[in-house]
Amino acid sequence: MTFPRSLVQSSGWALAVVLLGGFTPNAPESSSSMSLATSARRVAGDVAPARLFPREVREPLAPGLVSVSNPGAPQQPLVPPLAPETRSSKSTVLHVAPGSAPQQLSLPIDTPEDAWVMFIPKGTDAQRGEQALRDMSMFDPRGVRADVRAARSADEALGVNASRLKAEGISRPVTLMRMSREMSAGAYQVRVGAEAARVGMAIEVRLPSSPTELSLTASAMQFFPGEEGYVTVDLHSTARLDKVRFEATLYNPRFERDRTVPVVQVGQEYRALVSRVLSERDEPGAWVLEVRATGRSEGKDFDRLAQTSVGFAVPTARIVSAGRPRLVRDAAGKVASFEVDVVLESQARDRYEVSGTLVATDRRGAERPVAEAQVTDQLGVGSHTLTLRFDAGQVGLSRMEGAYALRELRLFSLGTNALYHRLGRGLELRMPAASVAEFAAPVMTPALEHRLKAGDFNVLP
């Protein structure tokens, strides 16, 4: 999906340029020795565009090649890339839009023994919000007023001395209500008075013990236009469910209600077809999918609401291949760096960044990061080669030897602040064998000296 710069662990082009004078790179690789991105083994969290789109350049793009190498943090194993998570819900939210008319809402509560209900005024005016809360009331299925009793129970659960507040002349509106086992299951009625309707209100109910749960799982971390990206909608319960109905709504990156998403049954599961309603004309960023599931369970109505975020980007470039990794030696014959040529395909002028992580394997078989590299340049339409350079001196700080491997190969657009391509296995590339004794000494800086003194490069047993 689309992430801020910190979430892709990239230093960016603002770092100092690494001067390559004095190094003797090998000749460019032939096409037969290139590893193709199309044949890469995909892992959870990978994203790879199948199609590219031309884009009108609107952002100011700085020219100039920048190549950076930084030492890794070998004390911790390599963190796996972000992968789609399942968002589950045993709650629902009903909204009263600001400026509405007085109304009555039905709030199904199937397990009142530990349910919580909240009234949340809309807007930022605290005084008007308090007045709106005093204009709200809730009644149980028998028509008996339930909100005052539930609010008293909530005060007790939270340790609030309501009697003392009353004695001191402090009157609080009902905002938070805790249900109890003695209260009936069924459809509660919430009456929204004139002032509450003018201000607007969100009514949330949480049902931790309910047997009915709604879960959402995105098919990928990031969706691209024209590709089959969807969110799996799973409604499961230990009770029998009838008359189930799904409604899915998409909110744009500014969290404005934007459009409806179809929910269809595919085999044994339901899917919200997000990619079907997005195109290359839509805004890149984090979109929010909201799904409401309603129906009946054991003869009682239920209502569940769940949200999940899906990344959306309009890719203008992708990684095509990577060449065979090579050693670069300095004039003294020491290994100065490990290098990998990465070939990109671009359909628009942008400032692109390629980054990767070099790992070593410890005695327990865990991969630990020993160096990170980024290279960025302003590139136009066509095929381009950027070279990742890992400083061998920085790699040697951990004293870990063996076959160093490239992981987390990424392509990022600085013009759109979007991740376009990520290959967690890094095309399975391994560096040529070399011992730490062959490495050139790293260029020491105050920051590097501080990390050495702190033991940051010592691999924990």
Image (cartoon, helix red, strand yellow):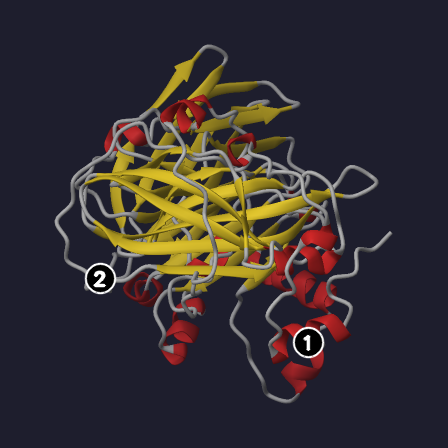
From the viewer's side, name the closer residue of 300 and 140: 300
Q: Is residue 416 left or right of 429 when viewed as pictured?
A: left
Please tell me whether mark 2 sits on a helix, a strand or a loop.
loop
Q: Assess disc 1: are there few (<14), some (14-19) or many (≥20) residues with their C-alpha within 10 Å of its C-alpha.
A: few
Q: Earlier in the sequence, mark 1 or mark 2?
A: 2
Residue type, numbered disc 1:
Glu
Q: Is residue 32 left or right of 261 when viewed as pictured?
A: right
The relative height of residue 341 versus residue 261 in the rendered view (above or below) is below
The relative height of residue 243 versus residue 333 in the rendered view (above or below) is above
Res 315 visible: no
The relative height of residue 29 versus residue 238 in the rendered view (above or below) is below
Return the x and y of residue 66 as percentages of the image width and height: 37, 61
Return the x and y of residue 177 as percentages of the image width and height: 60, 59
Return the x and y of residue 394 as percentages of the image width and height: 63, 60
Furthest residue in direction top, as rendered: 267
Please tell me whether mark 1 sits on a helix, a strand or a loop.
helix
Q: Which mark is nearer the camera, 1 or 2?
A: 1
The relative height of residue 233 versus residue 434 in the rendered view (above or below) is above
> Label 1 to label 2, Cα distance in Å?
34 Å
Furthest residue in direction front, as rendered: 332
Image quarter hosting the N terminus? top left
Residue type, numbered disc 2:
Leu
Q: Which residue is mark 2?
A: 61
Q: Is residue 52 left or right of 362 when viewed as pictured?
A: left
Q: Are marks 1 and 2 in contact (CB under 8 Å)?
A: no
Query: Which residue is depicted at the point 60% across and 35% down?
Result: 430
Furthest residue in direction left, as rendered: 56
From the viewer's side, name the closer residue of 38 and 223: 38
Query: Which residue is depicted at the point 64% across and 36% down?
Result: 210
Quadrant of the rendered structure where residue 80 is? top right
Q: Which residue is mark 1?
A: 449
From the viewer's side, name the closer residue of 287 and 345: 345
